[in-house]
Image (tube, rainbow, N blue to C red):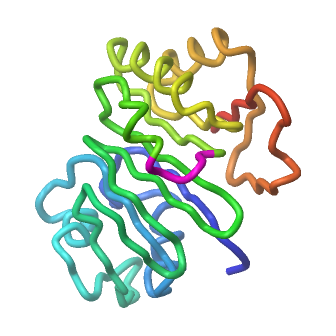
Amino acid sequence: KDGAKIIIAGSGMSQGGRILRHEKEYLDDKNTTLLLVGYQSVGSIGRLLQDGAKNITIDGEKVKINNFVLEGLGEYEVGGIACYGMTEGGFVFRDDEFGFCYLDGVNSELDEKTLEDLPEIEILIVHIAGEKNINVIEKNIKIIEPKIVIPFGDNELVNKLVNKEGGSKEFEDSIKIKRSDLPFEGQKIFTIK
């Protein structure tokens, strides 16, 4: 289970697809952090996780859950990773190597004063959900100034962002990023195929 990973899954409430394989492999690990950022319907595995289940069943196999819930605003530490809950759908994570920011459902520009109190953000992972949302995301990218941006969500809007910001590198299942991969100037955009 070598090193830190960020796994992004689309909507589906953990009812099928590759996310189940990842959940089965990692949810029993005390160092795993699972963010459920969208609606989880009653009876779904996602809702069970959101409601604090201690065990779930995936493919007929019982999986123990080591859960810690980030309630929102505030500072936390989980498995040696510092976590900062920001306003409306934003979290910043800092390990020994990188500062990651995850934004979902953020419908307004981030306050630069708020960002001053957070660690440097090298990697921004952002969910693009609608036309109104993309304008705010573009502004927040300029405010945060990450070295790497990983947008996901509405494919047409992701492509619009990529074209406006200057191209991307695609990856399919996973991507490994080392400090040496960070650009000295500007930023790189990585997109999920």
Q: Residue at x 80, y 43 (%)?
A: 182
Magenta stretch contains residue 131: no
Q: Main secondary structure of the magenta part?
A: loop
Q: Residue at x 83, y 37 (%)?
A: 183
Residue 132 in picture, x, y percent from top left = 32, 13
Quadrant location of residue 149?
Answer: top right
Relative placement, left or right, of 164 versus 118 is right
Q: How many labels were placed on the picture?
A: 0
Which stretch did the figure color magenta?
117-121
| Farthest left residue in view | 42
Q: Residue at x 44, y 49 (%)?
A: 117
Q: Is residue 185 above or below residue 9?
A: above
72, 12: nearer the viewer? 72
Residue 80 in picture, x, y percent from top left = 54, 79
172, 6: nearer the viewer? 6
User: Which image quarter is the N terminus in?
Assistant: bottom right
Q: Is residue 176 above or below residue 139?
A: below
